[in-house]
Image: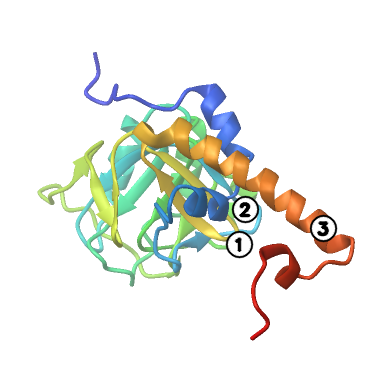
Amino acid sequence: MSEYDFARPTAAQIKTAAGISTATMHEAGGKIGALPSGIKQAHPSFELCGPAFPVSGPPGDNLWLHRGIASAKPGDILVISVGGHYEAGYWGEIMSTAAVAQKLGGMLIDGCVRDASILPKVGFPVFARGFCMRGTGKDFNGQGTLGKALSIGDIRIEPGDLVRGDADGVCVVPLARFDEVMKKSQDRDSKEAGVMDRLRKGETTMDVYGWPMK
């Protein structure tokens, strides 16, 4: 048994989550799981939905990211922390190509990437702080982790948690709360559809929500 055989959402659960927006999950779950707003799609076509495979490595070094690609399971989302050092391009065309070959589900990094014009052509979903041309090193004595819990911003991310990324950002849902949050998210979407129907018929938001004008 591999040390990375931790619990993950099922294929059916991931399919359900893929139909729900990050904003809805965040709000319906009680304002949970919102990663820093600076972490965005590297291209408008990119979305994430899958189990977290956390990876940490030293600032300015991407060796542990390569190790993560080789260790994660198909469908996993690499969730990467590099010690808060943003002035480096930790990920690019070669790593995206390798991740596609390993059938990974995507990656997000609390740092920067490069090869901005090429990543969409490779098609592997990448979320990052931005783009940086500066290269990284590979310290074979550097300390890092694979498949171990880590924090990005004020959010603790455990292996196997659901990672959902879209144009609004990234939301992480604890695996233990998955069914609860998805049910609440679906209920919220249904309720909001009813609100919008009333608005289209001429009511105002003040009417719908019963808010006072003064």
Can residue 173 be seen at all in this image of the molecule? Answer: yes
Q: Which residue is drawn at 30% across and 36% down?
A: 159
- Dot 2 amino acid type: Pro
Q: Nearer the viewer, residue 167 or 98?
A: 167
Label 3: which residue? 198
**Residue at far right of view:** 201
Snapshot quadrant of residue 60: bottom left
Say which of 20 and 116 sits in front: 20
The answer to whether the residues at label 2 and label 1 have Cβ atoms under 8 Å apart is: yes
Q: In which quarter of the image is residue 111?
A: bottom left
The scheme the figure's colours follow is rainbow
Horizontal side of 168 relative to 83 (left or right) equals right
Answer left or right for 31 relative to 16: left
Q: Type of residue at label 1?
A: Ser
As drawn, which residue projects farthest toward the bottom? 214
- Under circle 3, the secondary element is helix
* Tag of residue 104: none
Q: Give the CA distance from mark 2 to mark 3.
A: 39 Å
Which disc, if any, is residue 120?
2
Kindly tell me whether residue 76 is visible in this rendering.
no
- On screen, residue 23 above or below 94: below
Q: Is residue 204 left or right of residue 55?
A: right
Q: How crowded is mark 3: few (under 14 residues within 10 Å), some or many (20 or more)?
A: some
Residue 132: % across, % down: 43, 70
Contact check, label 3 and label 1, Cβ < 8 Å: no
Q: Residues under labels 3 and 1: Cα distance? A: 43 Å
Residue highlighted by disc 1: 117
Disc nearest the viewer among 2 and 3: 3
Identify the mark nearer the N-term, 3 or 1.
1
Nearest the eye: 106 or 18: 18
- Crowding around mark 1 (Cα neighbors within 10 Å: few <14, some 14 to 19, many 20+) is few
Q: In which quarter of the image is the N terminus?
A: top left
